[in-house]
Image (cartoon, helix red, strand yellow):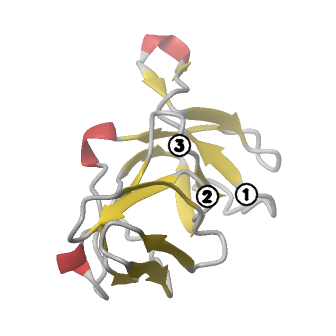
């Protein structure tokens, strides 16, 4: 959820966009302290020829192999009409891993709500971003970025 000022179409940019997550092992409940990222650009084969995933990892505590895959066709922009409401922007297929937290960072893009001016380098690490739209002489911004992880 965010408050948008004169921008729309806030979205992750490119297949190399990094979704920074805290991931919980579904077997033992271990949640490593460090942030881990998954991207559409990376694909790792699963054991036994069962397809592939964005990340495959072995839990350091219990040794179980788990995976998480970004469902690319679920990636959806956050638009002006979504202002100050929660909206699902991405879904993951989880096998033994559960996302419990998300950290937005660099790699987002947006555009001017009235002008269509592209803003290709939006960094949301600080949960706020501001710029200026020269075409319409207005400030633009994304404020109070919050999120929630929902299990399906």
- Quarter containing the N terminus: bottom left
**Could you tell whether 91 is left or right of 79 in the image?**
right
Q: Rounded to the nearest whole Å, what is the CA distance between mark 2 and mark 3?
A: 13 Å
Is 33 rendered above or below residue 5? above
| C-beta proximity under 8 Å, tags 1 and 2 | yes
Q: Position of residue 104 (x, y in %)?
A: 57, 64
Viewer-side residue, 131 vs 17:
131
Does label 1 or label 2 sit earlier along the sequence?
A: 2
Q: Nearer the viewer, residue 103 or 91?
A: 103
- The crowd level at tag 1 (other Cα within 10 Å; few <14, some 14-19, many 20+) is some
Question: Alpha-carbon neighbours of circle 3 within 10 Å: few (<14), some, or many (≥20)?
Answer: some
Calculate the distance from the C-alpha at mark 1 to the C-alpha at mark 2: 6 Å
Residue 102: x and y, percent? Answer: 57, 66
Looking at the rendered structure, the number of numbered marks drawn on it comes to 3
Mark 2 packing: few (<14 Cα in 10 Å), some, or many (20+)? some
Q: Residue at x 55, y 17 (%)?
A: 47
**Would you say 10 lies left or right of 124 here?**
left
In the picture of the structure, the residue carrying the numbered disc 2 is 21
Of the numbered discs 3 and 1, the one sitting upstream in the chain is 3
Location of mark 3 (residue): 17
Q: Return the mark for residue 35.
A: 1
Under circle 3, the secondary element is loop
Residues at marks 3 and 1, CA–CA distance in whole angstroms: 15 Å
Does residue 88 show up? no
Residue 145 visible, this orientation: yes
């Amino acid at each position: 959820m965010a408050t948008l000022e004169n921008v729309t179409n806030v979205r992750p940019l490119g297949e190399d966009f990094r979704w920074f997550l805290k991931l919980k092992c579904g077997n033992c409940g271990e949640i490593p302290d460090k942030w881990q990222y998954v991207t559409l650009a990376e694909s790792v084969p699963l054991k036994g020829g069962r397809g592939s995933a964005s990340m495959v990892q072995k839990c350091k505590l219990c040794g179980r192999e788990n995976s998480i895959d970004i469902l690319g066709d679920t990636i959806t922009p956050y638009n002006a009409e979504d202002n100050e409401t929660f909206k699902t922007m991405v879904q993951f297929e989880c096998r033994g891993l559960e996302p419990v937290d998300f950290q937005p960072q660099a790699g987002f893009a947006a555009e001017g709500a009235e002008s269509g001016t592209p803003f290709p380098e939006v960094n949301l690490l600080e949960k706020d971003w501001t710029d200026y739209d020269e075409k319409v002489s207005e400030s633009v911004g994304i404020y109070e970025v919050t999120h929630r992880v929902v299990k399906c």
